[in-house]
Image: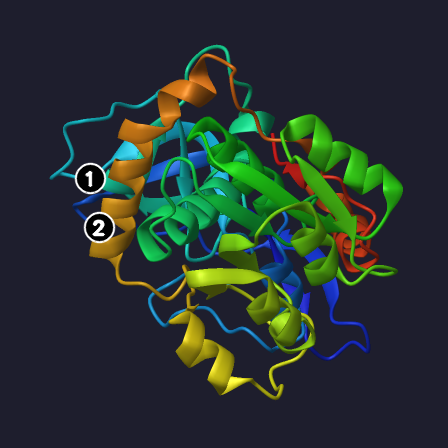
Amino acid sequence: MNAIVVDEDSPQHRLIWQQVPDPDPGPEEVLVDICATAVNRADLMQRQGNYPPPSDAPPYLGLEMAGRVAEIGAGVSDVQPGDRVCALLAGGGYAQRVAVHHKLLTPIAEGLSFNEAAAIPEAFYTAFVNLFLEAGLARGETVLIHAGASGVGMAAIQLAREEGCRVLATAGSEEKLACCRRLGAQLAVNYRDTDFATAILDHCDGVDVVLDVAGGSHLASNIKALKLKGRLVLISLLGGAEASIDLAAVLVKRLRIIGSLLRSRPLEEKIDITSQFRQRFWPVLERGSMAPLIHAVLPITEAEEAHRILNDNENLGKVVLQVR
């Protein structure tokens, strides 16, 4: 098969579509012919050597995929060759084939294309885990979602909206703010030119949950915006890993600060996450009440351009790479 390989000896860590060994699935795994994958910021980090895959994961980029089952292991009976499926991956999505544990697979309804299905697992599972399983977001609460026009941000806005929550968001351009509003954000703030905490407190009495990708640069304002017993979930550190913290506010407000990663979780946890999401929200996706927003679909051979789009923050939602 072919896969995208990172040329670590080139100055820009060039991406090369080249022949590599086929995966060797185990008895509980399924071999999938990948039709589409999607780009995530973790891919950009891995490309630069800053986010190595888990030891048991394929070495290639790609944290999600959609495709057709090609072969099944001896211990698999719930899927059959030819089935249309998608899955969260620990790696290996930028390839023609991948081996996946059968319990990580979700069947794709005929109404969803492979491109759409490939844009779901990483963004929607990340949003689901951190909003509901980590932060315990409940109906009627208020949530602030940073980077609302990103793949995870757009998924989070829709999930919180579907659960009957008041949604606030930040983004960095008027086009992205408008997109957040269309998806259901009641307030969308440009974090580049406005103190989002002040804007939020002018709009309401604060937020119960913050889903944050920035880290250090947003910490003080996040704490300011949180209500009593608020929860801050950190899923990335795009704004830096260090900051001063007002511990008095943490104590007085009885806040919780939660760090969360998805990729490094054990298989059993990922299976449970997949199962819970399928039961709770997959039917909503199938009937079209929620949907992944796709900024662009490019052939896998144009992975360099896909990475540039994300790196330059041009995307509204997901960038998909079509393999077949």
Answer left or right for 159 relative to 236.
left
Mark 1 neighbour density, 10 Å: few (under 14) some (14–19) many (20 or more): some
Compared with residue 305, is residue 280 higher up or lower down, i.e. above or below?
Answer: above
Residue 26's disc number: 2
| Image x and y of residue 259, in percent | 43, 70
Front one among 42 and 141? 141
Q: Secondary structure at mark 1?
A: loop
Color style of the picture = rainbow
- State which tag comes first along the sequence, 2 or 1: 2
Q: Amino acid at mark 2?
A: Gly
Say which quadrant the C terminus sits in.
top right
Residue 51 seen in this snapshot: yes
Compared with residue 61, is residue 110 higher up or lower down, i.e. above or below?
Answer: above
Compared with residue 271, is residue 258 higher up or lower down, i.e. above or below?
Answer: below
Q: Amino acid at mark 1?
A: Gly
Q: CA distance from mark 2 to mark 1?
A: 6 Å
The residue at the point 30 percent across, 33 percent down is 71
Mark 2 neighbour density, 10 Å: few (under 14) some (14–19) many (20 or more): some
Residue 36 seen in this snapshot: no
The residue at the point 66 percent across, 40 percent down is 318
Q: Which residue is mark 1?
A: 73
Q: Secondary structure at mark 2?
A: loop
Answer left or right for 224 relative to 301.
left
Answer left or right for 254 relative to 47.
left
Front one among 139 and 85? 139
Front one among 58 and 120? 120
Mark 2 and mark 1 in contact? Answer it, CB < 8 Å: yes
